[in-house]
Image (spheres, helix red, strand yellow):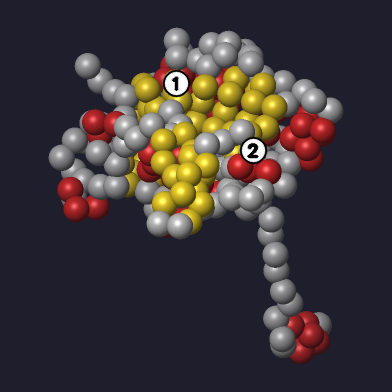
């Protein structure tokens, strides 16, 4: 049975419904599964719980699901670039489970590895520790954090073969690899798709055993969350010369 689907809408079909818990890879706008997120929007599913480092920006990435009020709860680390997220949270429309970034990453990794919970020093003595089990090990205080799993993981990869073996490229190798292991069903959008056996086994980051559905999405637009530039030291001299 093939893992490759014609488009993102077909890949999502039958998997996302009201109340589904999703993981969405990416860091900022780098390595986000934009086509799959758009397909989730088209399902019309509501009351979604979404596990993601951040919530995209207004109108991009998970921001499109916030616009349609399809997300009920976010389990996140950094959400500071999304004004709509802030508005919905402050108005009580959106529930937020805030995590230190390293804790979020480890909760997802633990979920994918079959580890139900672990202890960390991060957050001890802060609001993060409220309602959580606290224990001492070797004279140090630790919090217990639960591993995270999702009904469906949505991830982005640079290259894949038809068996679902994945290669990520540079900074897009962020939350995607661990989320690939932590979904009951894992969907991946890939920029380059090749036949099974064409990838060098030493270059594969995620084995195909974790991947259930693949959609080929070439020519993905590489968006920049916040562009910061500086003027070249000799820009003024160059400008005078050009004039």
Q: Are marks 1 and 2 in contact (CB under 8 Å)?
A: no
- The residue mark sitting in front, 1 or 2, is 2
Q: Which residue is drawn at 79% across and 85% down?
A: 236
State the residue position of label 1.
151
State the residue position of label 2.
130
Q: In x, y percent, where is residue 171?
A: 47, 55
Q: On the image, which quarter does residue 106 sit in?
A: top left
Q: In x, y percent, where is residue 45?
A: 60, 13
Q: Residue at x 64, y 16 (%)?
A: 47
Q: Which residue is drawn at 64% across and 38% down?
A: 130
Q: How crowded is mark 2: few (under 14 residues within 10 Å), some or many (20 or more)?
A: few
- Which label is found at residue 184? none
> Does residue 172 appear in this view?
no
Determine whether, in the image, residue 59 is placed left or right of residue 200: right
Q: How crowded is mark 1: few (under 14 residues within 10 Å), some or many (20 or more)?
A: some
Q: Residue at x 19, y 53 (%)?
A: 202
Determine whether, in the image, residue 23 is placed left or right of residue 187: right
Secondary element at tag 2: loop
Determine whether, in the image, residue 56 is placed left or right of residue 137: right
Q: In x, y percent, where is residue 205?
A: 29, 47
Q: On the image, which quarter does residue 192 sit in?
A: top left
Secondary element at tag 1: strand
């Amino acid at each position: 049975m093939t893992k490759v689907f014609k488009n993102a809408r077909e890949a999502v079909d039958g998997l996302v419904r009201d109340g589904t818990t999703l993981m969405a890879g990416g860091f900022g706008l780098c390595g986000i599964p934009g086509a799959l997120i758009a397909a989730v929007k088209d399902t019309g599913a509501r009351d979604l719980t979404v596990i993601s480092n951040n919530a995209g920006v207004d109108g991009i990435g998970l921001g499109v699901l916030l616009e349609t009020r399809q997300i009920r709860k976010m389990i996140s680390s950094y959400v500071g670039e999304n004004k709509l997220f802030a508005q919905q949270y402050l108005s009580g429309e959106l529930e937020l489970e805030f995590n230190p970034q390293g804790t979020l990453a480890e909760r997802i990794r633990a979920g994918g590895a079959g580890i139900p919970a672990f202890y960390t020093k991060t957050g001890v003595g802060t609001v993060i520790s409220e309602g959580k089990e606290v224990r001492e090990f070797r004279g140090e205080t630790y919090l217990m954090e639960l591993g995270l799993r999702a009904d469906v993981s949505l991830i982005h990869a640079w290259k894949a073969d038809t068996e679902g073996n994945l290669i990520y490229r540079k900074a897009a190798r962020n939350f995607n690899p661990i989320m690939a292991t932590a979904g009951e069903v894992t969907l991946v959008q890939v920029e380059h798709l090749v036949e099974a056996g064409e990838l060098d086994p030493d270059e594969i980051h995620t084995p195909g055993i974790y991947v259930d559905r693949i959609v080929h999405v070439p020519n993905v637009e590489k968006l920049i969350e916040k562009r910061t530039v500086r003027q070249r030291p000799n820009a003024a001299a160059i400008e005078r010369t050009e004039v």
